[in-house]
Amino acid sequence: MNQLLIDKACKGLAELELVEKKEITTPNSVVDLSNILGNSMDSHNISAIKNERMRMRQVLTKGIIDSFYMIQPKKSRERINISKKFSSVITRLNTPELAAKPEVILRILRSFRL
């Protein structure tokens, strides 16, 4: 399903690149070539290519953004609680009986790694 969301936009970006750099058009084009090519069909409209490229990038971004999980907002929400728990664990680990067992300290501290 994710591939279906981005196929047209990727194809459109590739078509724009072909038209702009090599002046090659493709059959069944996703991009409206009548806007991009000039009236005489010998030149191409640079501003129309830029606008179409921007539109294709927006479609591509809109298609894939729902598939991503943003971890930064979750980390920032949980930062205060985790820092409180971490500081309490550090004070608990500074006891003399645990100081002789560094592997236990490392195992406990590993659970706070993100």
Image: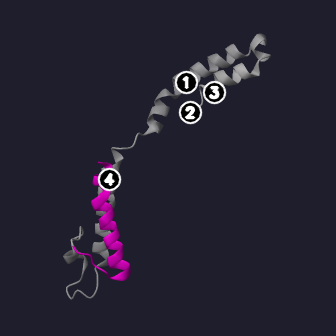
The range drawn in magenta is 1-27
Q: Earlier in the sequence, mark 3 or mark 4?
A: 4
Residue type at mark 1: give it. Answer: Ile
- The disc, 4 or 1, on the residue closer to the chain's N-terminal end is 4
CB atoms of marks 4 and 1 within 8 Å? no
Quote the CA–CA distance across marks 3 and 4.
37 Å
Residue at 47%, 38% in the rendered image: 72
Residue 64's tag is: none
Tag 4's secondary structure?
helix
Label 2, on which residue?
114
Instruction: Residue 107: name its quadrant.
Output: top right
Looking at the rendered structure, the secondary structure element under dot 1 is: helix
Residue visible at 19% across and 77% down?
A: 34
Q: Given this view, does label 1 or label 3 mark the residue nearer the observer?
A: 3
User: Compared to 76, does 50 lie above or below?
Assistant: below
Q: Is residue 93 left or right of residue 62?
A: right
Alpha carbon separation for disc pair 4 and 2: 30 Å
Q: Is residue 22 above or below residue 62?
A: below
Q: Looking at the rendered structure, which numbered label has been put on residue 3?
A: 4
Cα separation, mark 2 vs mark 3, equals 9 Å
Neighbor class of circle 4 (other Cα within 10 Å; few <14, some 14-19, many 20+) is few
Say which residue label 3 marks: 110
Instruction: Check disc 2 and give the amino acid type.
Output: Leu
The numbered mark at residue 82 is: 1
Q: Is residue 5 magenta?
A: yes
